[in-house]
Image (cartoon, rainbow, N blue to C red):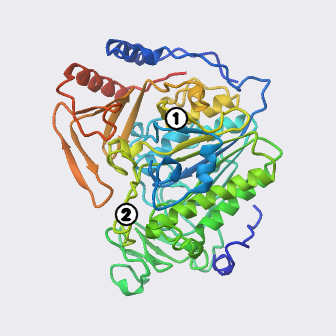
Amino acid sequence: MAEIAKMDAFSFQPSGVGSQPIRSRSNLVPVLSAIVVALGLSHLLQREVHATTSDESTKRPNIVLLYTDDVGYGDVSCYGATGVETPHVDRLAREGLRFTDAHCSAATCTPSRYALLTGSYAFRNKGARILSGNAGAIIKPGTITLPSLLQQTGYATGVVGKWHLGLGDGAVDWNKAVKPGPNEIGFDYHFLIPATGDRVPCVYLEQGRVVDLDPADPIQTSYGKPIGKGPTGKDRPDLLKQMWSHGHNATIVNGISRIGFMTGGKKARWVDEDMADVISHKAVSFIEANKQKPFFLFFSTHDIHVPRVPHSRFSGKSTMGLRGDAIVQMDWCVGQILKTLDRLKLTENTLVIFTSDNGPVLDDGYVDQANEKLGEHQPAGDFRGGKYSLFEGGTRVPFIVRWPERVKPGTETKALFGQVDLAATLSKLAGAERPDAGLPDSHDELDALLGDDPVGRPHLVHEAPRSLALRVGQWKFIPPGATREKLGPWNNVKIAKPGFLFELTTDPGETRNVAIDHLDRTTEFAAMLAKLREQADHSP
């Protein structure tokens, strides 16, 4: 990647690159419906059916999913950000539909990505947790996924950017073709950051091969015993251009120490400052190559995950230091996609979705002054908690839908929407035939996605490490246990029996626990969550 590093970021040129009838619900659904009715929330089941654009008379749209990393509800200006401006994200909101109650499935990265692609809550797969950089693939070949269903209907499918869903069968040999990976679960093309920017291996993977790998300099990685003689952040902090605060003190790559150990691959190693340019141009190339047919692009930015090392042209573009400047860089990536759609005259019939994989975090392992330079900016908006937390700030994220041919511009919806539903919803829109097996927790929420249904999902599970919570309408139930609060460094909030219950209409900040005042309701929600934990909700 040395050649890429030497090129001007602005001039870099990339190197080539119908639904079934409604199925019968599981035995769980009548139980849940009875609970909802008993709680006086039957209006959630009485949802008006609206005509959609999924009939045969309408041209199927291209689909671009802009999936950002650690971007909180309040981190973009159209959701109230201060200290940073995001004009390209704001353009999407101005020209589309802005959700105020949309959620990723988990308050951490890997589980949210797993749920989005498989339509299954991640807690159903014990391996779907935050992964090491050399973990095996957790979505196995043959799994029914959003890209595999779109692929079956003739869509060109591509994923560019952060992956972090594991690769290979376990003991990954980065010097050979790495399989299974995205190609084995429905993606025609991939260009990946294999895990995260703070984990080794610090190389790009394109179509199963490490980019620019020199066979004479093979790669080895370890997440246990140190390997090689290269310097580490723990032993040689004097070599670092960004100091670690916790956990990120192993192999040094590009002046930044990472999680895990790596030897070899010197020519292939990325330059963090160029990462946004590299992946944006690969995403643009995918669109250009597939402009004559319907395509699905899953563009997964690295920003604003740590290490936050934006290109120098974004330096000082916010008042919040590196974290704010990385938000500006993320917005630039969004702009590159929107400009490409405009240039190729694809804007009108392209469905663009902008969202994030979990809530915000400040100090997440590096000394980058994210806390010190925050000012009055509220990364999670008015919501409590953030990344790693069961409170609303952990999963309530920006979510914007733009489709000029179908979605009314400048609109807003309070519908409860979960990213777990994108698999069923988008495959339905594309005309895919939903199989009897697969997508166990994914609902067809096309009416809500397009702004026709103001209510949305009747219930939604939220996940944080080793714990779950439940939304039913505007009620939020968190069972006894503990969850993180604040945005790093953290403190744990202990939750005593019978748990926490919040009514979000009057208490969006989750400050007043009314579990005792509504004990019957608390008990019913606890039973509902237990049922959902044990049995999937096979809704059509």
Q: Residue at x 41, y 46 (%)?
A: 127
Give the residue type that dot 1 points to: Gly
| Residue holding disc 1 | 119
Q: Residue 385: percent from the left, percent from the top? A: 32, 48
Q: Residue at x 54, y 55 (%)?
A: 163
Residue farthest toward the right in the current orientation of the protein: 292
Along the line of sight, the residue nearer the viewer: 258 or 58: 58
- Quarter assignment of residue 125: top left
Residue 458 left/right relative to 454: left
Q: Residues within 10 Å of mark 2 (few under 14, many from 20)?
A: few
Residue at the image point whose x is 67% and y is 76% from the top: 4
Tell me the CA gap for discs 2 and 1: 38 Å
Local secondary structure at mark 1: loop
Q: Which residue is labeled 2 in the image?
A: 375
Residue 307 visible at all? no
**Any mark on residue 127, and which?**
none
Query: Which of label 2 and label 1 is nearer to you?
Result: 2
Which residue sits furthest bottom?
A: 238
> Dot 1: within a 10 Å radius of its alpha carbon, few (fewer than 14), some, or many (20 or more) residues?
many
Q: Is residue 477 left or right of residue 377?
A: left
Choose between 275 and 322: the one closer to the eye.
322
Residue 345 x/y as whole percent: 81, 48
- Image coordinates of residue 6 in percent, x first then y, are 66, 81
Inspect the image, locate mark 2, and give the three-letter code of the amino acid beneath it.
Answer: Gly
Q: Earlier in the sequence, mark 2 or mark 1?
A: 1
Displayed quadrant of residue 211: bottom right
Quarter holding the N terminus is: bottom right
Looking at the image, residue 194 lies above or below residue 344:
below
Pick the quarter of the image with the C terminus: top right
